[in-house]
Image (spheres, coloured by chain):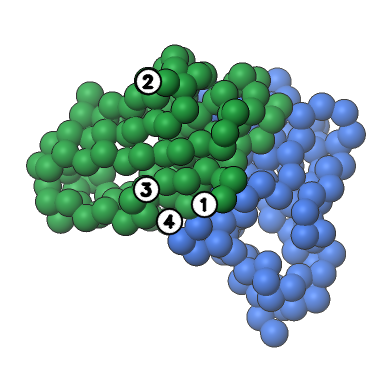
Amino acid sequence: GAGVSQSPRYKVAKRGQDVALRCDPISGHVSLFWYQQALGQGPEFLTYFQNEAQLDKSGLPSDRFFAERPEGSVSTLKIQRTQQEDSAVYLCASSFAQGNGNQPQHFGDGTRLSIL
Amino acid sequence: AQSVTQLGSHVSVSEGALVLLRCNYSSSVPPYLFWYVQYPNQGLQLLLKYTTGATLVKGINGFEAEFKKSETSFHLTKPSAHMSDAAEYFCAADSTLTFGKGTMLLVSP
């Protein structure tokens, strides 16, 4: 389809393992965002890319979290040495605009990460 | 930093009744404002947005919201609820979306 695609939809990992979550934005969308949504909470901003440049990573909760978008399209969110508190739904969104907020963000269905 | 407050984690209405979901923002500078809806196991879908101009914004599925600067509010309304409106609703502000905690809308027959 033409929407934002995230994979996998569900991921179960043991505490201490590394995980990688993938986001395919809408073709031509310049901006890409990652959010973390804990159970029963609203999404919380993690990081933002404009093309391949990571312009804001102020929401990443620790240095175990790393995101990249090397060619300005697909993005990967990596979490190293996972902890139970990392269990959440990770949402990716993309926008045509260059981060001015006027254009809406289009969200994928998310990856539900469970750390055992 | 911007913050968004949604009053009421759950709102229950009967089918056909008025829907009112409340949202207040903290910034003294009017931000960009959005309402999103989330169905179970799905991502967020944009209902409507306010950027500049007309303060009454109409969105999809019969929803609308009014930006009131004096009250720092952006409440979401729908004249007549439908069973298919049952979902979680999020108010958000600014370009790197600051979300409220969400309001679950329950619609009874």
Identify residue type, mark 3: Ser
Q: Is residue B56 left or right of residue B10?
A: right
Circle on res. A70: 2
Circle on res. A7: 3
Badge 4 or badge 2: first in the primary sequence: 4
Q: Chain of mark 1?
A: B
- Kindly identify which residue carries mark 4: A40
**Does any portion of residue B25 appear in the rendered image?**
no
Q: Chain of mark 2?
A: A
Identify residue type, mark 4: Gly
Q: Residue at x 69, y 85 (%)?
A: B109
Q: Residue at x 62, y 50 (%)?
A: B45
Dots 2 and 1: beta carbons under 8 Å? no
- Kindly identify which residue carries mark 1: B43
Q: Is residue A35 left or right of residue A103?
A: left
Q: Residue at x 52, y 52 (%)?
A: B43
